[in-house]
Image (cartoon, helix red, strand yellow):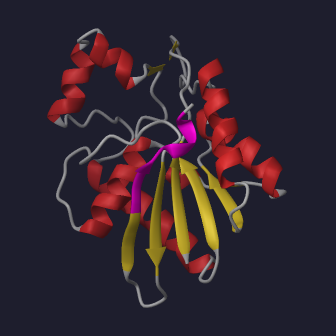
Amino acid sequence: MELLLIRHALPVRREVIEGPADPGLSAEGYQQAERLAQYLASESIAAIYVSPLKRAVQTAAPLARRLGVTPVVVDDVAEFDRTSNEYIPMEELQATNDPRWQKLIDGVWDSIDETQEQFRDRVVGAFEKIVEQNSSASVAVVCHGGVINLYLAHILGVQTQRGFFYPNYTSIHRVSASRSGVRSLMTLNETAHLRD
């Protein structure tokens, strides 16, 4: 089966005093989501799984409409910072040399909800369950950069604290998953659909 891991589109910056920030998409993000849907519309995608966070749900919506499928929400593919009261796009952190950018670069784990091991177990378990439920189909999972990094590092056997590459917004990463348990990376950071 083919597993398409898709990072959500560009969200807005959002900081709140209480509760999770959980931002929606920016205007550019909505355009990215539409381009993604156009690009994948001709593929035989049997199911769409999605993180419960707004940026992922909104990214999946245009593709789900085109394919005529209802996305299945999977809590275990939510990002490690899902309860954080702020979301600032990494490009903005980098451009302003924000100290939080350096923490990301240094691999500082700052999730208050779970350890790195718990995050890994949650994410790997979720993807393996999706594979098991769809043994002969192509499915898309719209989720997050940290989630994609972790799962791909897992199947490649890469040891990493926070990730080994930067998944672009609405990038596609294809994994071939066999019934025998073999997982093969087919494409990494596919972004042709974002070019003008």
First to last magenta residue range: 187-195
Instruction: Judge from the rendering whether residue 72 lies leftward or rightward of residue 86; answer left or right.
Output: right
Asked whether 64 or 16 is in front, the reply is 64
Work out whether residue 109 or residue 40 is closer to the camera in this orientation and state it: 40
- Furthest residue in direction bottom, as rendered: 180
**Which of 65/53 is in front?**
65
Q: Is residue 46 above or below residue 58?
A: below
Q: In the displayed orientation, state which residue is furthest to the front.
A: 196
User: How many callouts does the rendering have?
Assistant: 0
Task: Return the x and y of residue 186 as percentages of the image width and height.
Answer: 41, 67
Q: Residue at x 41, y 60 (%)?
A: 187
Residue 20 screen position, x and y as percent: 53, 25
Q: Residue at x 51, y 16 (%)?
A: 13
Q: Which quadrant, please, contains the N terminus?
A: bottom right
Residue 146 lies, in percent from the top left, at 37, 44
Task: Describe residue 70's horizontal placement relative to residue 115 as left or right.
Answer: right
x, y percent for residue 65: 82, 48
Q: Quadrant of residue 123?
A: bottom left
Image quadrant for the C terminus? top right
Whether residue 64 is visible, yes or no, is: yes
Picture residue at 54% right of the left edge, 36% below the top: 194
Answer above or below: position of 165 versus 20.
Answer: below
Q: In the rendered image, is residue 26 in sight?
A: no
Dividing the picture into quarters, in which one does residue 52 lie?
A: top right
Q: Say if the magenta span includes residue 188.
A: yes
User: Is residue 179 in the magenta section?
Assistant: no
